[in-house]
Image (cartoon, rainbow, N blue to C red):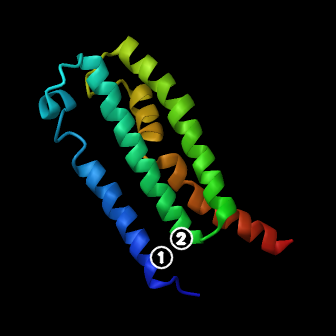
Amino acid sequence: MLPSYSRLAWMLLSFLVLAGVYLLQDAFSLNQSLALGLSAETDFVLKKLIRIVLNDTAALVLIYAWFYDAKITRLAFLLQLVDTFILLPVYLVLKLSIEGTAEISVPLLSQLHRLIVNPTLIILLIPAIYFQRIMYSQK
C-alpha cells in the first residue's frame, strides 16, 4: 500500500527540515543574530536546544507520516522527551565542563553529540519497528 500524497508531503517536509537544520547549524549565533548579550555558554546551550527540538520534531513528523500509527508516534515522542530532558542535559554538562563551547570534541563527546543532538535515536526507530513487525509476523 502506497502512502497518500499528504503523507508523502509530510515526509518530504520533514526531510527538508532535517536537511535545513543540518545545513544551517553553524550559520548563525543567537548573540550575533538577535544581539541578546548572552554568555558563550548560554548561546551554545540555546543553539543545541533549538537544534534538538527542530530535529526531533521533524523526525517525529516523519515517523507519524511513515507509519501512520498513534502507538508508534507516542513511543517516538517519549523517546524525544528522554532525549531532550535527560540525555541533552547530561551531554551539555559534560561538554561544557570538559571542553567549553568549542565545536570540535573529543571522540567520546563527538559520538554522544551525534546520538543526542542529531535525530539518531528517533530515526533508529524506523528499522527497529520493521524488525519488530518481521519478528511478530514469523510467530
Circle 1 is placed at which residue position? 7
Q: Position of residue 85 (x, y in %)?
A: 54, 31
Task: Please give the name of the residue rendered at 46% of the width and 56% of the height, measured from the top-left corner.
Answer: 59
Mark 2: few, some, or many residues within 10 Å (few <14, many ≥20)? some
Q: Position of residue 18 (x, y in %)?
A: 35, 55
Where on the picture, by quarter, is residue 16?
Answer: bottom left
Mark 1: few, some, or many residues within 10 Å (few <14, many ≥20)? some
**Does residue 14 lie above or below 101 as drawn?**
below
**Does residue 111 lie above or below 37 as drawn?**
below
Q: Position of residue 22 (x, y in %)?
A: 29, 49
Task: Please give the name of the residue rendered at 18% of the width and 32% of the height, measured from the top-left corner.
Answer: 29
User: In which quadrant of the rendered image does the C terminus lie?
Assistant: bottom right
Where on the picture, by quarter, is residue 103?
Answer: top left
Side of 35 relative to 62 (left or right): left
Residue 134, visible in the rendered structure: yes
Task: Please give the name of the residue rendered at 60% of the width and 71% of the height, measured from the top-left corner.
Answer: 68
Q: Amino acid at mark 1?
A: Arg
Describe the element under mark 1 as helix, strand or loop: helix
Q: Position of residue 14 (x, y in %)?
A: 39, 62
Do tag 2 and tag 1 residues touch (Cβ < 8 Å)?
yes
Residue 128, visible in the rendered structure: no
Side of 133 relative to 92 (left or right): right
User: In which quadrant of the rendered image does the N terminus lie?
Assistant: bottom right
